[in-house]
């Protein structure tokens, strides 16, 4: 089994269920994204470029969906956070019910549209 999938399956609930749901939405919305295991977390790549990642920071109580080219993402910027980071923005969820699939899909599609831009503007 892929180490990224092991990471997801080895998370305690509710995080495992949230990660599996996020994984399904990402793979339906961006079908050419490849799940890899980088920096000890699941990361989606488009060809050789990082696209987004899934993370459950130890003892933080949330799932983080981070986007590498977030400086160029314009959809739902008010729902994304940079807390604790300088350049990467993410969506943070503490329970499955918080995941708004419409917002997530629109951000994924916006991130896909800017995938060829430089990391930082």
Image (cartoon, grey):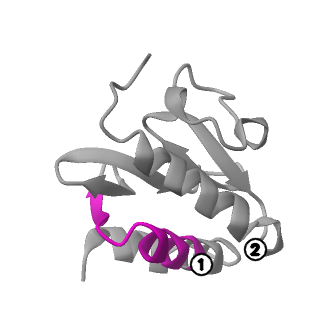
The stretch of residues the image draws in magenta is 21-37
Label located before the other in sequence (2 or 1): 1
Residue drawn at point x = 48 percent, y = 46 percent: 111
Q: Residue furthest front?
A: 113
Q: Is residue 36 magenta?
A: yes
Q: Is residue 19 magenta?
A: no
Q: Residue furthest left?
A: 48
Is 104 placed above or below 11 here? above
How many neighbours does mark 2 have within 10 angstroms: few (below 14), some (14-19), or many (20 or more)?
some
Residue 115 position within the rendered picture, expressed as x and y whole percent measured from the top left: 35, 42
Question: Which residue matches tag 2?
Answer: 96
Q: Residue furthest right?
A: 97
Q: Is residue 17 left or right of residue 50?
A: right
Secondary structure beneath dot 2 equals helix
In the rendering, which numbered label is found on residue 39?
A: none
Secondary structure beneath dot 1 equals helix
Q: What whole-number distance in Å separates the C-alpha atoms at marks 2 and 1?
A: 8 Å
The image quadrant where one finds the N terminus is bottom left
């Amino acid at each position: 089994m892929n180490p990224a999938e092991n990471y997801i399956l080895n998370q305690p609930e509710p995080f495992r269920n949230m990660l599996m749901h996020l994984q399904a939405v990402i793979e339906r919305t961006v079908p050419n994204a490849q799940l890899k295991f980088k920096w000890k977390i699941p990361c989606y790549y488009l060809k050789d470029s990082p696209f987004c990642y899934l993370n459950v920071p130890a003892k933080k109580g949330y799932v983080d969906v981070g986007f590498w080219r977030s400086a160029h993402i314009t959809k739902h910027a008010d729902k994304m956070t940079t807390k604790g980071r300088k350049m990467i923005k993410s969506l943070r969820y503490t329970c499955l019910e918080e995941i708004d699939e419409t917002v997530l899909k629109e951000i994924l599609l916006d991130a896909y549209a800017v995938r060829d831009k430089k990391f930082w503007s």
